[in-house]
Image (spheres, helix red, strand yellow):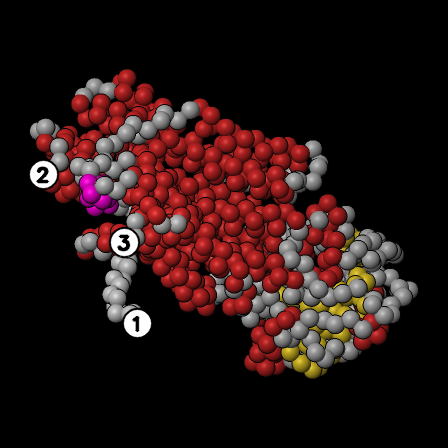
Amino acid sequence: MSDSEGRTHRMPRAKAENPKDMAWPAKKAAKKRGDVALARLVAAGNRPGRRRLLGIAAGIAVGVALLLMLVGAYSGFGPRSERAATGSVVKSNVELEDDSALGPGRAAAAVMSDHWRGSHYSILYVAGVAESGLAVPGVSALPGPGQAVVSPRLKQMIDASPDELGGRYGRVIGTISKEGLESPEAIMAVVGTTVPKLAASGLDAKIVEDFAGVDYAGRPYKAIALIGAVATLIPVLLLIAIVTDLGASQRAERFAALRLIGATPRRVAAVAAWETGAVAGVGALAGIALYFAAIPLAARIKVGAGRFYNDDLLVSPGWIAGIAVVTVMLAAAVAWRRTLRADVGPLGQSRERAERPPRAAALFPLAFGLGCLGCVAASARGGARPSTPLLVIGFLLTALGLIVAGPFVTRQLARVGMRRAGNASTVIAFNRIARFPKASFRTVSGMAVAAYTVTVFAVGVTAAAGVRTAPDGPDRLPMSVVAVFAGKTEDRAVETLREDLVNAPGVRAVAVGRLGGAGKVGALDDRSTAADQKMILPSAQARALGVAGPQRSEYVALNIGAVFLDDPLDVEEAPGDVQTHSDVRAILVRTDGRPATIERVRTRAMASGIPLSASPASRADLAAEGALAPENQFAAIAYVGIVIAALLSAVSLTVSAISSVIQRRRAFGLMRLTGMPRAVLRKVVSIEAVVPVAGVFLACLAAGAFTAWAVVFAASEGRRTVGLPSLGFYAVLALCLALAACSTAATVKAAFRVTGEGSVRFE
């Protein structure tokens, strides 16, 4: 280039950028770009590598989807229960009296359990709602006396069977929207009445200040729900951890090439972290998509009042992003640490290093967790309210303690086996287990946790009350008898109802009596109270019901337990001038036993205008009503947990077995190279697979049974205990053991396949 004077100037040559002269942020960015490029090169190196990455992504996707579904179910279960306005009566402590003053912010309410052809549901009676200014969730038009607002499902039932349900709750003026229902299938009615009628009914009527429900039936059930969620969550997290490590040894040869060209161990570990993190990110995104796609299917699982609304299972965007980010970070961190510890050498084969022997301190978390559970159970025995945080902490420590203590127990069993070994195969197998107890236990850790979780669920569910079967026979009240209990009302109204029922189609006989003791019908479920209650009936009417008694007496006394508790009939002679101290009148209606007749009798009684102390019911209705008990509703959750734990156990065991064979192919190859017969190698592999299972399986079962007892005993404040699990539990255990046997057989077969000359070509 020339200037104005003709002189030529040479352009300065750009200096080559020296990495040493680069700024630290620029060097760090360049290093990251290099790590990412190397990770792409390593990941896309061959078809088996891509299949391995696809397997990792699929496993993480399933784990993330299940994790999000569990979080959504747990977070949605409480708000779902809060939508039911019947819970407002449960949380109120103010009894409704005849002279109770209502007004702004105060209304009266009571809950009655009703029946229709095997369905059992709740009816909410309300009074003074319009004057109170309170809003009932999901109800736009508040019902007045003689009016009702029903759920869509109940409206369908009324329209389909008007002769059985029409007019039972009064004139239907609307339906309850989603905001007031636990489930799309929920059967519920909000029935308007008057304060005097509600107070005279004998129902457990309360004064309420709002109609918001409760999140759970009580604190114990909330603790049980949290424990159930954690119990199902642990196998999911373990599955993600196991899948992330799939094929770690397959990468050793490709990482060795990086070491051969000068990459440091930390650089290789960074490449592994980028590779696993990227795959985990893809798996997490796929898991989120799978979660949203599976919500309609998961919502069909019936728990409690019925299936979920789809919105109940939705997780907030913050939770979704947090779970995805944490999954990716943990997967990358695990890959970085394990690759760094593997110390991949430039010869293409990492040398196995004996693990640091686990110490007895590994038993402390398990012991501390069992101790926490024992303390909570002991406090419940002493009458103290159980500590929910301590209960959850004890359960969590016990579950994690089994995983931490597993390698220690496995090594101790291996040391005992080494001392008693009598041939080469047992010596080799027990020696390897003693040198690598963590790797040996990792193969069966998923099944161990599943065995513990299944035991907790299966043993805990035995505490549920279940649905009892009403016994029948000549010494019992006939199953066709419907009991109608009237509250405070005039005798003339009761007689009018009796005459109406006598003329009803399918009715054989009607008897009217009084209870020979004070108290509400709702309190008669207690056996000690029912033992002191008698129903005084005219002898002729009692015989028409099929109740045999003294022939010459004018009145007979029938034990109330024969009506409520399925006790045998105990009929005694009652004096003619018998006096009772109860306002509760009993109307016993003997029908032809046809469901349609029973439903018509029930509807006539409830539509008569007489205040009733309970829904008209037969002994079969009262027996089946136990299905509404909270513990029976939670039993459904336990069965779901058993299925999830068993399925995750199968997946975890399969993935662990495959990964274990790949990681040990060098050791197996050396054994074959030295001339070891196939039978000896088969025995070595079998022992290595069986010993960890035998070491922890019984311990998991015992810990699970103790945990279930402690949780049930503490949650019920000492009123309930557990029993032997059902046959389904033993079937699940047999399935787990069968999976272990199949895994062992597959491991042996794979060991012969991968132990060719190529596995030891660098020796």
Q: To which residue does mark 1 refer?
A: 4
Mark nearest the camera among 2 and 1 is 1
Amino acid of disc 1 = Ser
Q: Is residue 9 magenta?
A: no
Residue at left offset 63%, top offset 71%: 179
Q: Are marks 3 and 1 in contact (CB under 8 Å)?
A: no
> Going from the N terminus, do you reach mark 2 or mark 1 first?
1
Q: Position of residue 537 (x, y in %)?
A: 77, 60
- Let me know if residue 253 is in the magenta part: yes
Say which of marks 3 and 2 sits in front: 3
Which amino acid, by three-letter code, is at mark 3? Ala
Q: Main secondary structure of the magenta part?
A: helix
- Specify the quadrant of the image occupied by residue 216: bottom right
Tell me how far mark 3 sits from mark 2, CA to CA: 48 Å
Which region shows up in magenta? Answer: 250-261
206 sits to left or right of 335: right
Task: Please report contact status of discs 2 and 1: CB closer than 8 Å, yes or no.
Answer: no
Tell me the element at label 2: helix
User: Quarter of the image holding residue 403?
Assistant: top left
Residue assigned mark 2: 757
**Disc 2 residue type (three-letter):** Glu
